[in-house]
Image: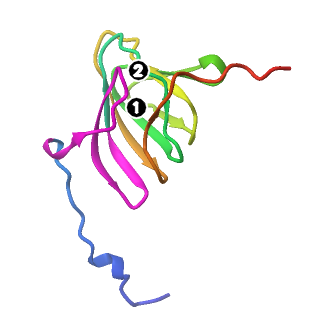
Amino acid sequence: MSTAPDPRSATPVRVIPDTALQPGDPTPGMSRRVAGHEQGMWTGTVDTEPGAVSGWHHHGEHETTLYVVSGRMRLESGPDGQDVVEAGPGDFIRVPAGAVHRESNPSGEPARAVIVRCGTGAPTINVDGPAGPTPP
């Protein structure tokens, strides 16, 4: 076991207050705020109003995990958007890199989720919609 201090130990822990979050990359129907985007990691929040449905998008080379803080989140993905998952407070949602999807809030209260993305390139790419089913 090494007794030498890890040089990274000199990097202090920091707080990013809610008031310091900046508007994030836009997708119609949702409001993202960025806490940080450095060294291959994007962190922030997303708020979706009751009944709102976002535009179709994907996160390029970023693997994404959402933690639902409040409200409900429904994500449609897969061929023609036929794969649907829904999550509520305390649930995590995993979105693979490149997965075209859209989010909605089927509840009567605002939804908020915390987002962590790891990868490179643009964190959000808006598209017209998902691909259709693969022909037989």
Tag 2: amino acid: Ser
Residue 82 showing in the rendered view: no
Query: What residue would you read off at disc 1?
Result: 90
Q: Furthest-right residue in view?
A: 136
Residue 72 or 52: which is nearer the viewer? 52
Say above or below: 18 vs 104.
below
Whether 20 is among the magenta residues is: yes
- Identify the residue shown where x is 81% and y is 20%: 135
Q: Position of residue 40 (x, y in %)?
A: 43, 57
On screen, residue 51 versus residue 82, left or right, reads left
Query: What residue would you read off at disc 2?
Result: 54
Q: Mark 2 packing: few (<14 Cα in 10 Å), some, or many (20+)? A: some
- Identify the residue shown where x is 53% and y is 36%: 95
Q: How many marks?
A: 2
Mark 1–mark 2 distance (CA, rounded to whole Å):
22 Å
Q: Position of residue 64 (x, y in %)?
A: 48, 42
Image-quadrant location for residue 131: top right
* Element carrying mark 1: loop
On screen, residue 126 versus residue 77, left or right, reads left
Whether 121 is among the magenta residues is: no
Say above or below: 7 vs 97.
below
First in sequence, mark 1 or 2: give its number: 2
Residue 6 showing in the rendered view: yes
- Identify the residue shown where x is 34% and y is 76%: 8
Q: Mark 1 packing: few (<14 Cα in 10 Å), some, or many (20+)? A: few
Image-quadrant location for residue 50: top left
Residue 49 or 125: which is nearer the viewer? 125
Magenta segment range? 19-44
Residue 77 or 128: which is nearer the viewer? 128
Tag 1: amino acid: Gly
Q: Position of residue 102 (x, y in %)?
A: 48, 23
On screen, residue 44 versus residue 96, left or right, reads left
